[in-house]
Amino acid sequence: MGMVLAVHGGAGSIPEELVASRRDGLEQALATGWQRLQQGEDALAAVVAAVEVMESLPQFNAGYGSTLTSSGTVEMDAGVMQGKGLHVGAVATISRVAHPIRLAVEVLHSPHILLAGAGAEAFAQSRNMPLIAPDDLISRRRRRMWEAWDHRPVDVMADDRGKTIQTDKDTVGAIALDSAGHVAAATSTGGMSWKLPGRVGDSPLVGAGFYADDALGAVSTTGWGETIARSLLGYRTVAGLEQFTPEESARRALQFLDESVQGSAGLILIRRDGEFTAAWNSAMMGYAVQREGEAPVIHQ
Ligand code: ASP
């Protein structure tokens, strides 16, 4: 079976000054994850390696460079799932960990599936992951954006489709199929700009921000988290593979999101045989995909 790896850098329009660096970041993440697959590592290792790259780069909304809450703080969510055994690990509202996705993997290997806030950070320490100062995750660009924010309530901001939504949907994610036929999915985010402190989005919620099942496929989603969670977009898309092609399943899931909760989102999806699709009902979504024996494709 041919291996496949895909990454995304979030749904929504991309500011002109970030187009080139986003593209570079996607390329870098794809190359890093692909190397893992080529070295014989599994799909989980590949998606985590790819997401870690994007968590390090300030042009994405994850890890360093995460968007800020209404209080000017960073609160990150992340989730990961292994198609083999349906194992899940996720973290929510963490502020002192450089790589939330790495901590999500630690949770996956624990008896729990989701840890939040101070408890998650204490768990990180117990796993010998160093805690950093929350301000170390704030990039100059995000600080400037927060300072320029006019403090309008978030529920009156309109997106590029005229819907009520906040800006900055540039979460990162990855999905993979490895040589043994296992799939995995990972998603990591700083969340929505100017969210209330304590808000948890879709990204750490299994079936919403991510889903993986070896019997069907894997997905990572991005966009307006509340609507993604209410429509269970991740699970809906993967479950659709029982009946439909990836393209048709993604189309139907996004149509449901649109009609039932007036949502805005994008996703990358891989079927268990390696068939890949990307789809969105937001203005656009940056993604990259590598298939065995083919040149990487970057869509930005
Ligand atoms: N889905 C994320 C959230 O609502 C945002 C994003 O995808 O950029 O937290």
Image: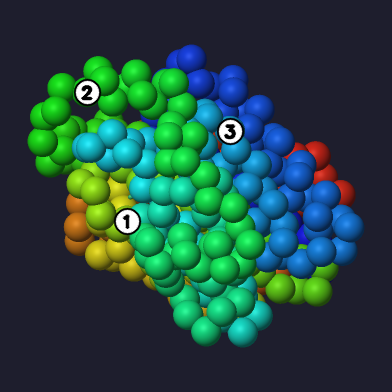
Residue kind at label 3, given as amino acid type: Leu
Identify the residue shown where x is 16% and y is 33%: 157
- The percent position of residue 37, horizontal first and vertical second, equals 81, 58
Task: Give the mark nearer the N terminus: 1 vs 3.
Answer: 3
Which label was assigned to residue 149? 2
Residue kind at label 2, given as amino acid type: Trp
Residue 77's place in the image compared with 229, above or below, is above
Task: Report helix, strand or loop for mark 2.
Answer: loop
- The percent position of residue 5, horizontal first and vertical second, equals 70, 53
In three-dimensional space, the C-alpha distance between marks 1 and 3, rounded to whole angstroms, equals 21 Å
- The percent position of residue 174, horizontal first and vertical second, equals 60, 53
194 or 238: nearer the viewer: 194
Q: Quadrant of residue 212?
A: bottom right
In three-dimensional space, the C-alpha distance between marks 2 and 1, rounded to whole angstroms, equals 21 Å
137 or 88: nearer the viewer: 137
Identify the residue shown where x is 63% and y is 47%: 52
Q: Horizontally, is 189 left or right of 58 in the view?
A: left
The answer to whether residue 88 is visible is yes
Residue kind at label 1, given as amino acid type: Gly
Task: Report helix, strand or loop for mark 3.
Answer: loop
- The percent position of residue 231, horizontal first and vertical second, equals 28, 65
- Residue identified by numbered label 1: 201
The answer to whether residue 249 is visible is no
Identify the residue shown where x is 47% and y is 76%: 113
- Label 1 packing within 10 angstroms: few (<14), some (14-19), many (20+): many
- Label 3 packing within 10 angstroms: few (<14), some (14-19), many (20+): some
Which quadrant is the C terminus positioned in?
top right
Residue 119's place in the image compared with 146, above or below, is below
Residue 24's place in the image compared with 2, above or below, is above
- Residue identified by numbered label 3: 57
- Label 2 packing within 10 angstroms: few (<14), some (14-19), many (20+): few
